[in-house]
């Protein structure tokens, strides 16, 4: 049904955080084989999935964020346009470090702490 609705059209499909090649194998036949300028953007942490999807020459290996990048992202999400109270900097950097350079983790944790303005939280 998906293939039928996409046939003859231009589309961009985003498959985010695919973990197994079997998942790609299960959905790849749903997309028309004709090239009408359409694309599929697949993100994965697993290089085997990227290879099996045939993206060897088109894949981009992303590195984890360094502590400074992690802190800057954490700050921008948790405090947005607010001035950063000095008492939050030490604990904020510790929290950002515990996210091990993973941008999504940093953004989610910082988002959860966005409304918390007591150091105990």
Image: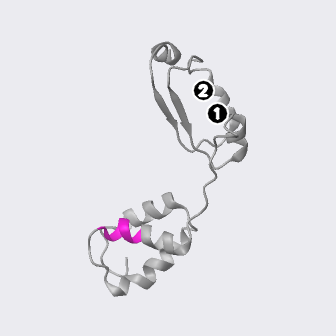
Picture coordinates of residue 33, whole percent (x, y): 60, 18
Q: Crowding near pointer 1: few (<14 within 10 Å), some, many (20+)? A: few
Q: How is the image coloured?
A: one colour
**Magenta residue span:** 74-80
Q: Quadrant of residue 75?
A: bottom left
Mark 1 element type: helix
Residue 85: x, y in percent? 31, 83
In screen coordinates, is 71 left or right of 120? Answer: right
Q: Which residue is mark 1?
A: 23
Q: Are marks 1 and 2 in contact (CB under 8 Å)?
A: yes
Any mark on residue 27, and which?
2
Q: Residue furthest bottom?
A: 87
> Is the residue 17 above or below the residue 101 in the image?
above
The magenta stretch spans residue 36: no
Quadrant housing the C terminus = bottom left
Number of disc labels: 2
Left or right, residue 13 beside residue 88:
right
Residue at point 56%, 71% (across, down): 66
Q: Is residue 76 a member of the stretch shown in magenta?
A: yes
């Amino acid at each position: 049904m998906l293939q039928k609705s996409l046939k003859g059209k231009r589309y961009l499909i985003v498959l985010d955080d695919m973990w197994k090649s079997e998942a790609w194998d299960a959905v790849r036949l749903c997309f028309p084989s004709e090239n009408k300028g359409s694309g599929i953007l697949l993100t994965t942490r697993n290089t085997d999935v990227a290879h099996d999807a045939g993206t060897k020459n088109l894949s981009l290996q992303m590195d984890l964020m360094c502590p400074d990048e992690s802190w800057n992202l954490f700050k921008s999400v948790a405090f947005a346009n607010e001035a950063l109270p000095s008492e939050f900097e030490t604990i904020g950097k510790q929290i950002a470090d515990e996210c091990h350079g993973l941008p999504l983790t940093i953004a989610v944790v910082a988002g959860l702490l966005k409304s918390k303005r007591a150091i105990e939280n």
